Image (cartoon, rainbow, N blue to C red):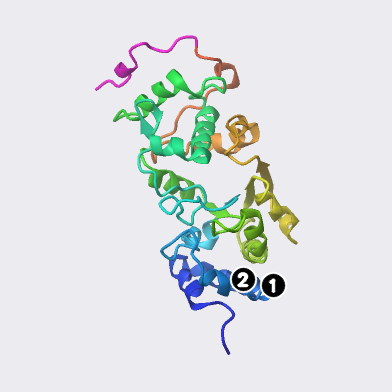
Amino acid sequence: MTSPIPAAILATLEQAHPSWHPALLAGLTAVAEANPGYLPELAGDSYLPTDGRLLAAFAQPLNAVRYVLVGEGPYPRAASATGVCFMDGAVTSLWSDTGLSKSVNRATSLRNFMKMLLVAEGALHIDQTTGTAMAAIGLQAQCPDSGRIQTMPQLQSNLTAHGFLLLNATPVFRPDVPPVKEARFWLPFLKKILDSLAERSVPAPSLVLWGKIAAQVNALPGAERFPQQAAEHPYNLTFIGNLSMHRLFGPMHLLAAPGVTMAVASSDSRKPLQSIPDEISQLCNT
């Protein structure tokens, strides 16, 4: 009997952890049953991410997942789309002497996510997330003893260590298909993924839903089994000041190197900076 899943799509299972294979096969089968022509069309088309990374987000063991973060879709650039939500493959260094690196600043969602993390830990005030305040942060972060991570892979590693499964509502981007339409084809897939997480012997993970497309997950049967937190998509500037995201991510210290805990400021100490050193370059004691 011919498989309803094209061989090119099945081959992408190679980048997923073996513990996920039954759930992923069930999910792909559900997509094929709901829309029989979709996966063959996709297999014959050009889409992002490339290099067989369709299921790259499932690299960690199923039982290690504590949070399911759902964004909207892959970055629309081949160098950026990695198959892992918000992890931009075009970004290496996170920092620069003016704050965040140029490649981070080009990726609007990533830039706002990092600024949200800095506000959450008290390193930035919500009213001072640009200019001189960011330059001070960037220079401090590059100091050898700053305790900060330096690269995008390190940020992804920190998220994975906290149990994040970094998904997109649609795992593919095609320039001629609106993401909201593409995402509808993948709802049966997401349902099977949630079913597999709910059936584990460990507690159900929390859903973290970013943006309107990701919010479609709420409509899936069984979604009520999971604790949920929703926020606007990080490409919105308001995401930087989202208090529920501060409460979730602040204690995780995702911008800290492994083994380092950055001091989280109290609400009273998150006042606008009255003065920032004129000689920012002297912030490193090197």
Estimate the x, y position of residue 131 in percent, counting from the top left: 45, 20
Q: Which mark is residue 38?
A: 2
Instruction: Look at the picture and state if 177 lies above or below 235.
Output: below
Query: Nearest the camera: 93 or 24?
Result: 93
Instruction: Look at the picture and state if 210 lies above or below 64.
Output: above
Q: What's the residue at 38%, 25% (across, down)?
A: 98
Residue furthest to the left: 286
Estimate the x, y position of residue 43 in percent, counting from the top left: 52, 71
Instruction: Look at the picture and state if 223 lies above or below 239.
Output: below
Quadrant where the image shows the N terminus:
bottom right
Query: Nearest the camera: 207 or 111?
Result: 111
Q: Please, what is the three-letter code of the amino acid marked with disc 2?
A: Tyr
Number of numbered discs: 2
Estimate the x, y position of residue 119 in percent, counting from the top left: 53, 27
Say what secondary structure mark 1 lies in. helix
Q: Residues within 10 Å of mark 2 (few under 14, many from 20)?
A: some
Question: Which residue carries the number 1 mark?
Answer: 34
Q: Confirm or deny contact between disc 2 and disc 1 (CB under 8 A).
A: yes
Q: Main secondary structure of the magenta part?
A: loop
Q: What's the residue at 64%, 56% (across, down)?
A: 204
Q: What's the residue at 61%, 71% (across, down)?
A: 38
Find the distance from the CA under tag 2 to the CA under tag 1: 9 Å
Q: Which residues are magenta?
A: 274-286
Q: Please, what is the three-letter code of the amino acid marked with disc 1?
A: Ala
